[in-house]
Amino acid sequence: MEFSEACDNFYKELGASKKMVLSTSLNDVVTSRMMSIVVINKKIYFQTDRTFRKYKQLKKNSRVSLCAENIQIEGNCEEVGTPLDNTEFANAYKKYFLSSYTRYSSLKNECLFVVMPTFVEKWVYIDGIPYIEILDMVKKQYELRQYIGV
């Protein structure tokens, strides 16, 4: 399989929305929390409050990790305004996470972040055999490697 096909398959499996664990770090302290994310044009978006610990970590260290089920994503994160400033995000978030949208999206401290994936690792089983699927988004390389375990 070529990179572009594998990349398209990855985003199709990830879907338009998901609850994922977001890990951030600063000064050798790593923290994780569950986040509601939406995917728009192969970018991962989430919103958060400027007073939260993760916000402070993100502003000083843009490298993040996201995880759900068998998918692990590493990427760079950037603040891109407020949730309601981005109509496409606001509409998607409202569609998939109405309760959170209603409660939080219009709050004055709420901000919007986008994650640009740089590396994706996924466990897959083919005929019961475990494989690790790797997408290097920076080098645009795809690898499917059987897990042997020694």
Image (spheres, rainbow, N blue to C red):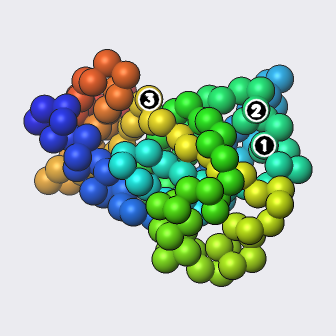
Q: Tag 3's secondary structure?
A: strand
Q: Residue at x 48, y 68 (%)?
A: 92
Front residue of this view, candidates 130 and 46: 46
Q: Residue 59 got which mark?
A: 2
Amino acid identity at mark 3 = Thr
Give the residue type that dot 1 points to.
Tyr
Q: Which numbered circle lies on residue 90?
A: none
Of the residues tagged 1 and 3, which is closer to the observer? Answer: 1
- Marks 1 and 3: CB-CB under 8 Å? no
Q: Amino acid at mark 2?
A: Lys
Which callout, 2 or 3, points to the residue nearer the camera? 2
Numbered badge on residue 55: 1
The residue located at (62%, 36%) in the rendering is 78
Mark 1 → mark 2, Cα distance in angstroms: 6 Å
Label 1: how many residues lie within 10 Å, few (<14), some (14-19) or many (20+)?
A: some
The answer to whether the residue labelled 1 contacts the one labelled 2, judged by CB atoms less than 8 Å apart, is yes
Residue contact at pointers 2 and 3, CB within 8 angstroms:
no
Circle 2 packing at 10 Å, graded few (<14), some (14-19), many (20+), is some
Q: Is residue 19 visible?
A: no
Q: Residue placed at 14% from the left, 53% from the top? A: 127
Secondary structure beneath dot 2 equals: helix
Query: Whole-Å distance between the Cαs marked 2 and 3?
Result: 18 Å
Residue at the spot of label 3: 118
Asked if 32 appears above or below 47 in the picture, the reply is above
> In what quadrant of the picture does the C terminus appear?
top left
Relative to 6, 87 lies left or right: right
Rendered view: 9 above or below 106: above
